[in-house]
Amino acid sequence: MDSISLQHVEKGKYQLLIILGLAVFTLLSAVFALGLGSSSNLDMVTSWKIVISDTKKFFLNIDTVADNLWYNLTACISSSSCEDRSLLHGIEREGTNIQNAIIWDWRFPRILTAIVGGIALAVAGALMQGCLGNPLVSPLTLGVASGAALGAAFAIVLGFTILSIPELAIVANAFFFSLVVVTIIIQLGKIRSISAESYILVGIAITFICGAIVSTMQYFATDAQLSQLAHWSFGSLSRPSGGNVILMGLILASLLPTALKWSWDLNTLSMGGDEFAISTGVNPSKIRKNILIVSALMTSIVIAFTGLIGFVGLAAPHMSRLIVGNDFRKLIPCSGLFGAFLMIFADTLGRTLFAPIVIPVGVMLSIIGGPFFMYLLLRRGGHH
Amino acid sequence: MSSSELILSVENLTVGYNEELISKINLEINTGDVIAVVGPSGIGKTTLLRTIAGLVKPISGDIFCKAPKRGGIGYIPQKLGLVRHTSVYHNVDLGARSGSRFFSEPKTWFKRRSERVTTAVERMGLSDKMNEPVRRLSGGQQRRVATARTLAQRPKLILADEFLSELDEDNISIVLDAVKEYMAASESAMIIVEHNIQRATEISTRLLQIKNGELVEYNPSEMKFDLDGGLI
């Protein structure tokens, strides 16, 4: 019962400063990543110039931007022949068309996805580790990800899709099937004698079942289908478009406040278990169920678009715990920022290291993050 | 107390873990009730309390609770579950935090919380120990801290598990007076699990005894004891 030690209570202000610093650092690394790339006609200074001038123009000509957005939303939906305008359409700009396209259509959504996805997965990981009382839990433990993989396999191998729009078929399938897993989790909460361990074990069982079905499909799949499925499962940030990221961000923004609202309840759960939680007026089973649903939703919305990215949800909460301790009021925001930073870092390295080959962020995260994570844990002399 | 209203109703409840401990529980609890559940150890008293608190799911049957969903039920466990290295204030604040809602009036949240803490601690006669770490208090004082924590939560239904055992007479009267004062002011009800039948009859308005896996209700004022404190 000493997870929130006096030391951490006393160091509160210092930790808030660290979190603030981490936020600034993450933002700076996002801007830095926006300027970094393999294009030969776009060096870092030029890209920053474009970014700064375009941002300025965006805010100075906000009415034109709104007009363009309105045009995209109205005129372009009714007629199929029209092309989406860029938001700065009709304004003289700094860069050439290609340069603008590289920065705003390619790098920007990618970095935004890294931020949104990193925050969502890391926060989901912190929530799940807290409410299940197990440091090995990650957002993929409950089987949400394997549900998504099953959905993707259905779309790719069998051609069975929920939505008939080709660009969104795999995403919709992955999301739908992960929702099925979320429903199973909700139903589990109603069963008698459900404990934190049984949630984890059922999640592992779901992972095995979905894995077996996917393997069966792979066994009968063609080479092309196999490679597409393998690519999906790597986890990459290049898939979501700008609109997708905004959708992800909106859903995340609606779920995050609830997560923060429950942070104190999570504290009581992680301090002394169910008995302690209820003696301070927190209903443990209800909180556990609610938190699992929210974190599973956060995970599924992200991995439906990006594919499997597991490591950030496991490592970011642990790394933050080493900095701010086990107080979830600070741990949740700190994990989110750390997750975003890890994703930006790994993705930027992945797309610049062997350019023009882009290494998927899921792979890159594990390669760099794994040893770093091990170092952090061992340095503290086996803190966990 | 003006008029009593229903707080908890239990219908055909069966509680237990793997095997049934108590079955066919039908119970209606109104404000102002102090219910004592008695019976030998291992018979399912604590399990019944934990089921009502929501820690254990019932085998069958329904529990309808009128208390607010958040902080409406206060549970005082047998093992107190206090944070030993922090102050009395901090511990009582844990209860005050779940009871007072932030979003209803964010500006006065901290003020409301600290008011709750000071009232509860004063009721328990621990005002001078406010900033003392809990581990430096005696067993009886720690139990008073745990009770203060639940009172600061301002629950409609208090569930107390053997919360008078290990207490001397002075402490018992402090705790009981404070709880009764709170109950009168807040129109709440209380369920106590107690192994000492004589004490249970003294403090309760309704007495439930577990016999052969079922609850039997007595009126405590009609109970008689022999010289050794045994039930006649």
Image: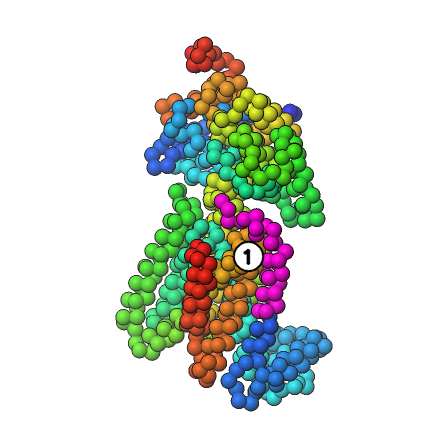
Residue B191 position in % (x across, y down): 51, 28
- The answer to whether residue A378 of the structure is visible from this angle is yes
Residue A195, compared with residue B26, is above or below; it is: below
Q: Is residue A241 left or right of residue B14?
A: right
The one of B23 and B96 positioned closer to us in this rendering = B96
Write down the region rendered in magenta: A1-26
Q: Is mark 1 on a helix, strand or loop?
A: helix
Residue B5 visible to the viewer: no
In the displayed structure, A263 sits above or below A216; it is above
Front residue of B157 and A85: B157
**Residue A373, image quadrant:** bottom left
Prevailing SS of the magenta stretch: helix
User: Which residue is disc 1 drawn over?
Assistant: A324
Left or right, B75 with reference to A157:
right
| Residue occupying the point 48% across, 17% down | B198
Q: Where's residue A46, x and y in %?
A: 61, 85
